[in-house]
Image (cartoon, rainbow, N blue to C red):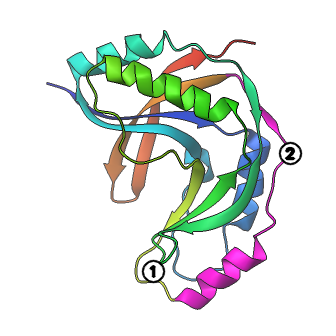
Amino acid sequence: MDSYRLFTAVDLSDQAREAIGRICAGIPGVKWLDPAQLHLTLRFIGDADSSLFVRIREELSGVEAKAFELSLQGVGRFPPKRDPRVLWVGVERNEALPRLRQSVEQALERCGLEPEGQGFSPHITLARLKDMPWSPVAAFLERNRLFSTPPFPVSEFHLYSSTLTPRGAIHRREASYPLRA
């Protein structure tokens, strides 16, 4: 039986990817994510068998949400008070993104999935860190604290599968869902 590692996401504009690509440097030893793989995760679903995959794909087609604009703003790290394990670019606050995320969450709950336990903290992961000295991370955060992109349109969201490889995850778009104009 096939198994899928799934998540839903919003894609970034080419201009946003290029802008992010320009700041992903300056920390020796960091493996930055491939700009082509950058996305804003709405909900990580995890492993699903082929039957659940079909139900999820169908249920997501009923998500009703309006198209909106998204701007990226600022950089940060997770966790905020311990050794950093993830570097990210933030999302400028807007009301449409959390509404879309909630609609996706409700569709997944109708498929029998448990609600995601943590709050929604929209971000784009740039790099995962391991045993990284603090000073180059702090310098990166300071150097890019005013990072921002012009607004770009979000007119659809996607269901992706993810395959883990030694060189990083490879994402494949499984379905796309248009948002209302």
Q: Give the mark, 2 or 1, whose residue is nearer the N terminus.
A: 1
Residue 159 vertical position relative to residue 73 in the rendered view, above or below: above
- Magenta residues, start to end: 134-155
Determine if residue 174 is in view.
no
Number of numbered tags placed on the structure image: 2
Q: Quadrant of the N terminus?
A: top left
Residue depicted at 62% across the width and 67% down the height: 76
Residue 149 is inside the magenta segment? yes
* Along the line of sight, the residue nearer the viewer: 167 or 81: 81
Q: Amino acid at mark 1?
A: Asp
Instruction: Tell me the CA gap for discs 2 and 1.
Output: 31 Å
The answer to which quarter of the image holds residue 105 is top left
Name the residue that disc number 1 marks: 83
What x and y, as percent, mark residue 177? 56, 17
The secondary element bearing badge 1 is classed as: loop
The residue drawn where x is 75% and y is 27% is 68
- Residue 65 pos. (x, y %): 62, 17
Pointer 2: what residue?
Answer: 150
Residue at image coords 33%, 53%? 165
Q: Residue furthest right?
A: 150
Q: Position of residue 71 (x, y in %)?
A: 77, 44
- What's the amino acid at mark 2? Pro
Q: Quadrant of the C terminus?
A: top right
Residue 176 in the magenta stretch? The answer is: no
